[in-house]
């Protein structure tokens, strides 16, 4: 896989990034590399985008059991959204504010500055929203 662009954000340190994009109002910009600009046609018609990216500064996964940010217990990494993973791939749903050439202004940033972008997919509620009947350890977390 090769990045299709880079995400510019106000966050320079891991400790500054919000836990999830849905908890962030921060604004940033995606810069799509020239070879991929044609792939943006029609993206401006969507209010939200799904971003897949590389957690390029995430600590290397040393264990498959991790303590998520919102709980005090350890769980298997695949039952969490913890950034230290076997493959450091991140996923965020962001609000598209503006599309101008190869630059996309977005809101809901939760990644570090200069994050390599792997892919963009349009967010379509009919496809992407699901009713749930279980949300695992998250339902038992201590409410802060």
Image: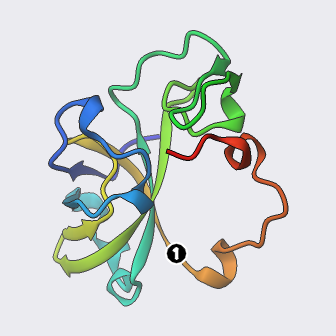
Which residue does the image show at 75% across and 52% down from the upper left?
Answer: 135
* In-image side of 17 versus 129 (left or right): left
**x 77%, y 72%: residue:** 131
| Figure check: 77 above or below 70 | above
Residue most toward the bottom? 45
User: Picture coordinates of residue 64 (x, y %)?
Assistant: 67, 18
Q: Position of residue 77 (x, y in %)?
A: 66, 28
Residue 90: % across, % down:
47, 43
Q: Nearer the viewer, residue 30 or 142?
A: 142
Instruction: Please tell me whether residue 105 is drawn above or below residue 51 in the rendered image.
Output: below
Q: Residue furthest top?
A: 62
Residue at 55% over, 29% down: 87
**In what element is the residue under mark 1?**
loop
Farthest residue toward the right? 133
Give left or right: position of 52 versus 131.
left
Tag 1: Cα neighbours inside 10 Å, few (<14), some, or many (≥20)?
A: some
**In this rendering, is residue 53 above or below 80?**
below
Direction from residue 130 to residue 29 in the image, left or right: left
**Residue bearing the label numbered 1:** 123
Q: Viewer-proximal residue, 87 or 5? A: 87
């Amino acid at each position: 896989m090769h990045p299709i662009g880079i995400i510019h954000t106000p966050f320079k340190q891991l400790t500054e990034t919000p836990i999830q994009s849905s908890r962030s109002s921060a604004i940033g910009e995606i810069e799509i590399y020239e070879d991929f600009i044609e792939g943006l046609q029609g993206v401006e018609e969507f209010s939200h985008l799904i971003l897949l990216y590389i957690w390029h500064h995430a600590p290397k996964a040393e264990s498959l059991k991790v303590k998520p940010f919102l709980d005090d217990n350890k769980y298997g990494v695949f039952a969490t959204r913890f950034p230290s993973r076997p493959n450091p791939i991140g996923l965020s749903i962001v609000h598209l504010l503006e599309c101008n050439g190869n630059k996309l202004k977005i809101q809901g940033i939760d990644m570090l500055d200069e994050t390599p972008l792997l892919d963009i997919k349009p967010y379509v509620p009919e496809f992407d929203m699901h009713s749930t009947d279980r949300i695992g350890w998250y339902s038992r977390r201590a409410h802060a």
